[in-house]
Amino acid sequence: MISRTKDGQYLSTSAKRLEWDYCFDYMAPLRRNLTNPRIERLLKVMEAFRLLDREMPASLTSCFLYVASHDDCHKQALEEDLVMKTSSTSRNTDWLSKYHRLKKPGLNLITKEADPANRRRQVLKLSPKGEQLVKLIEELLYD
């Protein structure tokens, strides 16, 4: 294939490729110097969450970390402590549990059960998959 350059000359594809490569030979290398290893560990944790769902919002991550740090807690406590609306926590805890909205599969990281002492309250606990994720997070942060 033949293409035309800005100065009106014609180049074959292979010549064009050489010209393109020549331009990038003189660019500075990408900077990747690690300046804060502790923050990099946190980045790895965030990437572990993104492996579960590439579009996971921060509020969902916060809800999971709350349940992970307050296992066997009430959903209302999560709402109050994270200052979230009931509708938001319901949506997030559904996503984290076995079934998401509209019968779509959830992440299965927590379980939601009715509190035996007060059936109007929900108790949130880590599922086995959620416990595995907590172990991975601890390894990434503290090992």
Image (cartoon, rainbow, N blue to C red):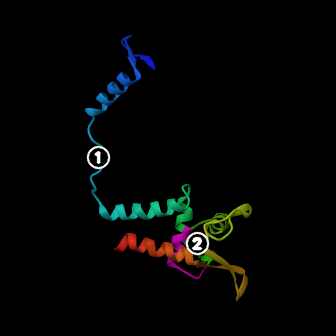
- Provide residue 118's location: percent of width, then percent of height: 72, 85
Q: Is 18 in front, or is 30? A: 18
Packing grade of label 2 (10 A; few <14, some 14-19, many >=20) is: many
Q: Is residue 121 above or below residue 5?
A: below
Side (left or right) of 75 relative to 16: right
- Provide residue 42's location: percent of width, then percent of height: 39, 64
Which residues make up the magenta segment? 63-73
In the rendered structure, which amino acid carries the disc numbered 1?
Arg
- Screen quadrant of the C terminus: bottom left
Distance of label 1 from label 2 (alpha carbons): 36 Å
Q: Which mark is first along the chain, 2 or 1? A: 1
Q: Main secondary structure of the magenta part?
A: helix
Residue 11 is inside the magenta segment: no
Tell me the residue at 45%/61% (across/down).
46
Q: Secondary structure at mark 2?
A: loop
Side (left or right) of 95 relative to 81: right
Tell me the residue at 39%/69% (across/down).
140
Tell me the residue at 35%/74% (across/down).
142
- Provide residue 91's location: percent of width, then percent of height: 66, 64
Quickly name the residue at label 2: 109
> Which residue is outermost to the bottom?
117
Quickly name the residue at label 1: 31
> Which residue is outermost to the top?
8
Q: Is residue 15 above or below residue 108?
A: above
Residue 89: which quarter of the image? bottom right
In the rendered structure, which amino acid carries the disc numbered 2?
Leu
Q: Secondary structure at mark 1?
A: loop
Disc number placed over residue 142 in the picture, else none: none
